[in-house]
Image: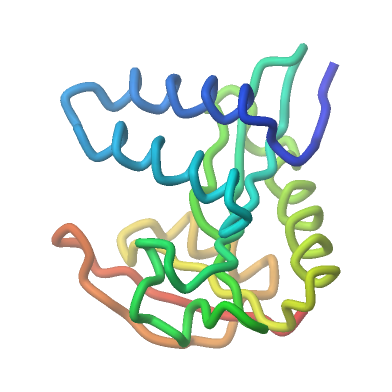
Amino acid sequence: MIEYRKATINDLEKIWDKDIAMNENQECWVRWKGQYIDYNKTGKATTFVVLDNNEPIGQITVLFSSECSAVKNRPMLCDGKTTANMNAFRIDKKYEGKGHISKLVKMAEQYAKDKGIRYLTIGSEAKESRNLAIYLHFGYTEFITSFVEDNELVLFYGKII
């Protein structure tokens, strides 16, 4: 049974452990797990998950605080007031193309809107043309800025919600 919801701490533990296993020997994933669980616990971020028979298969996180590492010192991406950043989009390969991410995006956008957010931003590595096309399809068409992160060019787009 497929379910969409705001992630519990147990959901976060499971999905990040899966991410860590898929990216072994990359210590950053262990660090990110701790950060994102803490962000969820403290209200700096909210993660939404899609589950299949209670097992997380996909996620999206909305960063609400400008203190989050992915947006720190980048007020155009998240100002802690009316602008937030959608981050950490992931879906297990076998579930791609079935509309799960679309449902999570709509859920995350509504949640952000209900919290007073009026503008959402999103980033995509320039080389990830498929992801970029998906984000443009979701209406994130206003180019904001670009940064080089981990030796990759990342393009950021925004949308009024």
Q: Is residue 149 above or below residue 2?
A: below
Instruction: Identify the residue shown where x is 62% and y is 22%.
Output: 10
Name the foreground residue: 65 vs 92.
65
Hey, which quadrant is residue 85 in on the image?
A: bottom right
Instruction: Identify the residue shown where x is 29% and y is 39%.
Output: 31
Name the foreground residue: 81 vs 128.
81
Q: Position of residue 156 (x, y in %)?
A: 44, 76
Q: Position of residue 81 (x, y in %)?
A: 64, 82
Q: Is residue 3 above or below residue 133?
A: above
Name the foreground residue: 125 vs 29.
29
Give the residue at the far front of this rendering: 42
Q: Is residue 4 above or below residue 42?
A: above
Q: Is residue 35 above or below residue 105?
A: above
Image quadrant containing the C terminus = bottom right
Image quadrant containing the N terminus = top right
Instruction: Identify the residue shown where x is 59% and y is 46%.
Output: 40
Q: Position of residue 29 (x, y in %)?
A: 31, 35
Q: Position of residue 37 (x, y in %)?
A: 50, 39
